[in-house]
Image: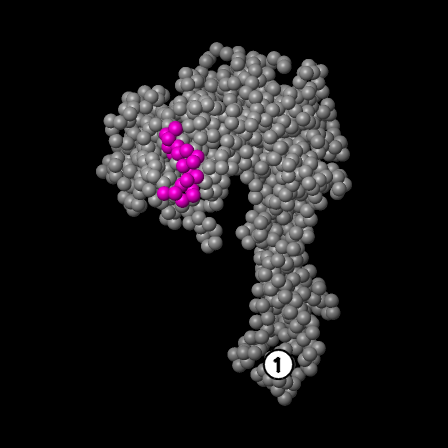
Amino acid sequence: MSTTHVSKEHLEAPAAPPAPNRLKDLGRQLLGTRRVIVGLVLLALLALFAFLGPLLSGWEVGERDFTDMLAAPSPEHWMGTNETGQDIFTRTTAGLRKSLLIGLLVAVLTTGFAALVGSFAGYFGGLVDKGLMWVADLALVLPNFVILAILSTHFAGNGGWFVLVILLAVFSWMVTSKMVRGMTISLREREYIHAARFMGVPPHRIILRHILPNMSSLLIADATIMVSAAIIGETALSYFGLGVHARRQPRRRDRRRFAVRHHGWWMFAFPAMLLVVMVLAVNMIGDGLRDALDPSSKSRRS
Amino acid sequence: MSTDTVTTTDAPSTGRGDDAPVLEVTDLTVTFPGLNDTTDVYAVRGVSYAISRGEVLGIVGESGSGKSVSSMAAMGLLPDHARITGSVRLHGEEILGLDDRAMARKRGRVISMVFQDPLSGLTPVYTVGDQLAEAVLVHDPKTSRARARARAVELLELVGIPNPEQRYRSFPHEFSGGMRQRVMIAMAMANDPDVIICDEPTTALDVTIQAQILELLRTAQRETGAAIVMITHDLGVVAGFVDRVLVMYAGRPVEMGAVDEIYYSSRMPYTMGLLGAVPRMDLDRQGALVPIQGTPPSLSDLPPGCPFAPRCPIAQPECELAEPDLLPIGDQPSAEFIRAVHDGTPAPASAADDVHDTGVQRSACVRSGEIAENAWTARDIYPVPEIPDTPVSAVRRDDRAEMLRVAELIKHHPLTKGTVFRRRVGTVYAVDGIDFDIREGETLALVGESGCGKSSTLMQIMGLERPQGGTIEVMGQNTAGLSRSARFALRRDMQIVFQDPMSSLDPRMPVFDIIAEPLRTHGESPSEVTRRVYELIDLVGLNTEHATRFPAEFSGGQRQRVGIARALALEPKLLVLDEPVSALDVSIQAGVVNLLEELQARLGLAYLFVAHDLSVVRHIADRVAVMYLGRIVEIGDTHSIYTRPSHPYTQALLSAIPIPDPEKERARTHIVLDGDLPSPANPPTGCRFRTGARSSSHSPRTNRSSA
């Protein structure tokens, strides 16, 4: 009896406080972390720059200034021009737009798909596991770059970038899904999973509510890495003249430029800087999210 | 100054006054400096003891009380960043602060240690014999390899390993837990040390194996004449084994004395509570256990006064002023004196300067004199909850509704070999035809050692699937013919509480969501969920503000309460308890056991209680089923099983459990079984216990007496 005495006294005043809201709590916590704020602000600024930049500049993406080829930054060309006289500023904003869309979308799609495939394979085991992992192995064996190259030229066009996002995602989920599968197999035997099963929680809810949240650190880390991997993948395609429409190339590359590069530092310094800032911002948000989701993490307020 | 303790060993009883102590620890403190902005952890604060040849000292305390750290410090095994002060003298020579090389020469030869986990104590890539021979060679490089080898075989034989010549070439993984612990003890004995420190040597082992190991430690002591420091949380192990006891709490010794003094006339409320909290296997109707409220203080943020004061039922204002010293009974300063010192009056020199171990009973409680005068016991100072009788206990058992019936249940796992061409090479008979039933409002305990099939049985029952063989009927419904929705509905009536409160709660979910999950799953409305969750939180003795916290922020006992609340959410009629208290400290365990009994009485629950701890079982169960290698060897009501066990395995099991009562424990003769449990993949033919039985004439009858 005495075990409940203490608590009863506490409970007299508020009969039944409202249910705590996990999402609201999580949001508040996220916005309370400086890193997340800085990351979000940086990302917002980048997006602003990418979408408003072209309006400010007087140059079109493909337009050439034949009077100013390979010129250093000047009031006329804020970030200089390349050797064909194209304005670097305009080209950078155009490339950044694509990189933002492709990087973030591919990361979310890839990680989400990998998490689902891996956890279902790991949780159910048996034939489901065999089938899904067979598909993953198959996808791993395929020469994905060649396939990407062929398919992307086929789809090049107006909605081409979205097809490219899907293609990039389709070819990069396998390794993560195998990791997720391994972790699921070890989590599956935890007692809280047994408890959920014994109270009748259906398998898909167990996976979404218990298994995936418990590997959120891995998933977030994977997604942040995926952002830069996707940008690099897309850039590599563009480098070979594939990928997104040839005239809207991502900012860092021109096809035949090795020789010229050291002549004009502005040609790669500005785009590279923006890429670094973008990856940094994504990492900051990822870190903050991981800490907010992990109750045992130290930076969490108690 | 010879003590009046009766030594349980055949070692020549040495007067403590004659020879100098082998190991003398004086005012030892260990502090782990905090990193960055975390505070320092004061793990050990002023431990002093002296131990002479042939003596056995027990250091008792709950987890986190600093008992292991203090002995690691004495062995020089703590990491470099730990700040250690005080003095540790081995044969009068100061060893604290010796460099690692000098210390290595002492370790193993003069002072050796037996660790808790025998698996991580042995290197997996060398044979057991070579590791033993190495222990010999390291301290005496001139010995020839053949001599070292012969000594290793001799040691293996001494610790009771059968076929030592052949087992010399075995690798650690080929040994069972008990056998590995034997090897560890052999290694500790290898160079005839003067002191052997045993850090929870039997905690990871089954009771029958524990009895073997304790017997072996007695042999080791007899052979080497060494002093033994026995560190344990198990008050039963200490009772029969040691001469003197040191009780630790929050890094400090709070009471010290001869084992009889501590057990029969403790003068420290903490020790008294601890002894009252232990369920007793030797008492039939013990009543409610003595729970100690609260949890031990954090070692980085200690209260200024007595660390036990916040949990102490007889604390006075003076207890919070200054930490009491470990002083002989009656020598504690008066309350006025403490107030005077606290207010800044220059204190006259007190006896506190004498930190040496003198051998008389001492206790760190300002009211120890008062306790001695009034001869208070734990039940006098602790409020003991009253647990009402189960309402259904008045009804005859046969007339009560059947909650669960298991008949001829079978679970065999195939053992296969090869990956491409799988072939069956054998069968693990995990559960091999068991029958039992549970009626409304009663508790059936399923007891047995690890690997006997307890957990497999539970998983079969909780799965509500068609079993491999036999039938499971829950609330009269056969699980074999259940439809999906019927199975889902039936889950409401049967819930489970797991053993490990750490892994049974999702670490990413706040307590509210954990308790709400079963309710949401079964489609309760949000307002109903909220109301019920707070009701449950209150029912299991937690506070409303706990709802938003995560499992990691709770102590083990509190977590187990959350687990119980979750299991009760759907108002089940049958609760399956899978070793619910075995991971908890004694004082916390008592609170949970009381809670379970109270809930049973209030809600009329039926329990299927799975445990290996027969003391808890006697306390809580109405009926007991003893399992051995996948079969129930004996089933009956608790009283008759404990007073008249008819199967030799039950007898051995009961006999192996140490009783926390020194006199009774010394008077008992333990039936020590030979060897390990046979593998469930290769059970002996005929009676399964045949190989473990010492008495050859027994018939496998079951004690089926109904309640």
Could you tell me which quadrant the N terminus of chain B lies in?
Answer: top left
Counting from the top left corner in percent of width and height, residue B250 is at 45, 38
Residue nearest the observer in this picture, A147 or B324: B324
Residue nearest the observer in this picture, B550 or B383: B383
Residue drawn at x 56%, y 30% is: B591
Query: Which residue, given by chain and number where applicable, does mark 1 sit on?
Result: A78
Counting from the top left corner in percent of width and height, residue A114 is at 64, 52
Q: Is residue A28 left or right of residue B289?
A: right
Q: Secondary structure at mark 1?
A: loop
Q: Which residues are magenta?
A: B326-346
Q: Amino acid at mark 1?
A: Trp
- Image: B707 above or below B561: above
Residue drawn at x 48%, y 54% is: B37
- Image: B120 above or below A61: above
Counting from the top left corner in percent of width and height, residue B167 is at 38, 30
Residue drawn at x 61%, y 40% is: B505
Q: Is residue B644 magenta?
A: no
Total labels drawn: 1
Could you tell me which quadrant the C terminus of chain B lies in?
Answer: top right
